[in-house]
Amino acid sequence: RAGHQNFAIDGALASVIKTYLVVQQSDSALTFLTQVWPNIKAQIAILFDKFDVDGDGVIRGPQQNTYDTAMLEANTFIGSYYVTALRAASRMARLMDDAALATSYEQRASLASASYDRICWREEYGYYVADVDIKTCRYSYGPGCFVDQLCAAGLSAACGLGPVFNAAHEASARRAIAKYNVVAKPPWQDMQKHLFDGDTGVTVCTYPHGKLGAGMQYDTLVSTGFTSSVIAGLLFDRNTDDAERLNGYIRQRHDGRNRSPWNEPECNLLYSRAMAHYNLFDQACGLVYDATAAHLAFDPRYTPTAFRCFFIAEAGWGEFEQMGAARLASGTVTVHVLFGSLSLASLGLATAASVATASVDGDPIGVSLAAGVVSFAPRLLLATDQRLTVTLGGRAIGGMVEVAVGGETPSGKAAVAATEAGGLRLRRRHAGEDKQASAGGQHTQPLGVFSSAQVAMMVMGGATLFLLGMLCGGRGLAA
């Protein structure tokens, strides 16, 4: 819809990013990209001509957005979308063999990232503000702590594009949101009355350092979808404590007693913004998949020495498993295709190993390992039920696969243990339980068994019953 009058710029930019995400995850032949590429270029051209008018990477004019207003001046809400859209467009330009255009987009993205960080970061606050004054602050969050100040960061992480701005500043800003934007009823009264007595949630904007004018519209709104990108970013930062806490507020409210786990209302019932929760799974697993490069990567935020999760690829799905020593200096990694097929040229791992060997169904194959990337030449094509095994550091590690929700030490947290038939057994550890205890030990409480397909449906359904699960009041449900 390039050129459509008065389009919401957050949606216009997000459409560019999501186009790249679709291409990256499911368009290895570039059939879809070839069809839409002229519109992508036209959209970026309009942004350069009509919005980034000074050519300095900053949008200052009216910026219509999902809050039903047109904010003015530099702000990292729209700025995060702009930087990420430019980086995504650069990646697509390279896929279309237009190196010059790719470089142009990337240079503007770098300029924009630096400019927004310089203009909007406030060291004394620990978060990003909107660069407005009393004359331009209408509809703006101004000096407030805004839940969407880094809104596109979740999409950037999902695309494997990394931090949008300064990584340390981003982590600080998300910690500030987790500190300043948490509200409880009573006494808080949210705009749409989604909170019941005893509920806790994350509101759109607070003003710990004062406000300009009347503040922004919808600043007292409490909706789950706005929180998703914050939680995904916290997981990207490896700030699992705050991620679990904010996610726990959502799961506590939607635990089936007063509200359905499958319906998270916002401006209506079954509101689609809640589907952003799926990114929490990707970031908890550190999962990045690129079908165009046949590349799959994992960097688990939970128990990286004993971890398993499912993955979905362009032509199939399966399970990933890693077990080994700290920093995966030695250990074993397995990719098991359970349905369809998986084309794989490289496998990215958070490993300190310098040596790797590999086999497919026990047959040795040639591999190389450099900077945490295991490369296969020629490219592998794994069929249903085939298993790729990579041994790092020269030896294999056996034992139970376990994901402890809450960090390296599973004491008092929920854990996931691998069981027969490819299922996942949900169980809870007690404080003081030995990390090496067996799944059948007296200190464990079975909570149920789910197949990987069922887990996928849980996440897609919006209940977010996955690694984070229902973490509230000391209870943990993981999948």
Image (cartoon, rainbow, N blue to C red):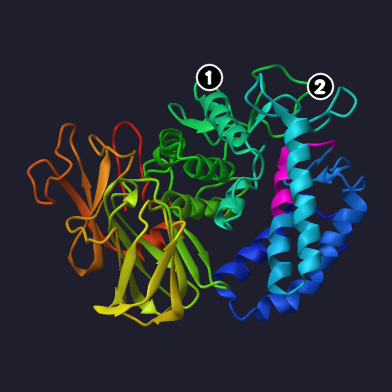
Measure how far apart labels 1 and 2 are at the Cα level: 24 Å
| Image height of 38 relative to 144, above or below | below
Image quadrant assignment for residue 400: bottom left
| Camera-nearest residue between 461 and 11 | 11
Over which residues does the magenta segment extend?
72-85
Q: Using residue 438 as the reference point, say whether residue 373 is left or right of it.
A: right
Name the residue at 34% across, 61% down: 355
Q: Is residue 425 visible?
A: yes
Residue 291: percent from the left, percent from the top? Answer: 54, 72
Q: Using residue 143 as the reference point, say whether residue 226 is left or right of it.
A: left
Residue 97: percent from the left, percent from the top? Answer: 73, 74
Q: Is residue 4 visible?
A: no
Circles 1 and 2, Cβ within 8 Å, touching? The answer is no
Q: Using residue 269 as the reference point, say whether residue 89 is left or right of it.
A: right
| Image height of 479 relative to 74, above or below | below
- In the picture, the disc for residue 187 is 1
Under tag 2, what secondary structure?
A: loop
Image quadrant assignment for residue 164: top right
Q: What residue type is labelled 1?
A: Pro
Residue 33: percent from the left, percent from the top? Answer: 69, 75
Classify mark 1: residues with Cα within 10 Å, few (<14), some (14-19) or many (20+).
few
Write down the residue under mark 2.
Answer: 213
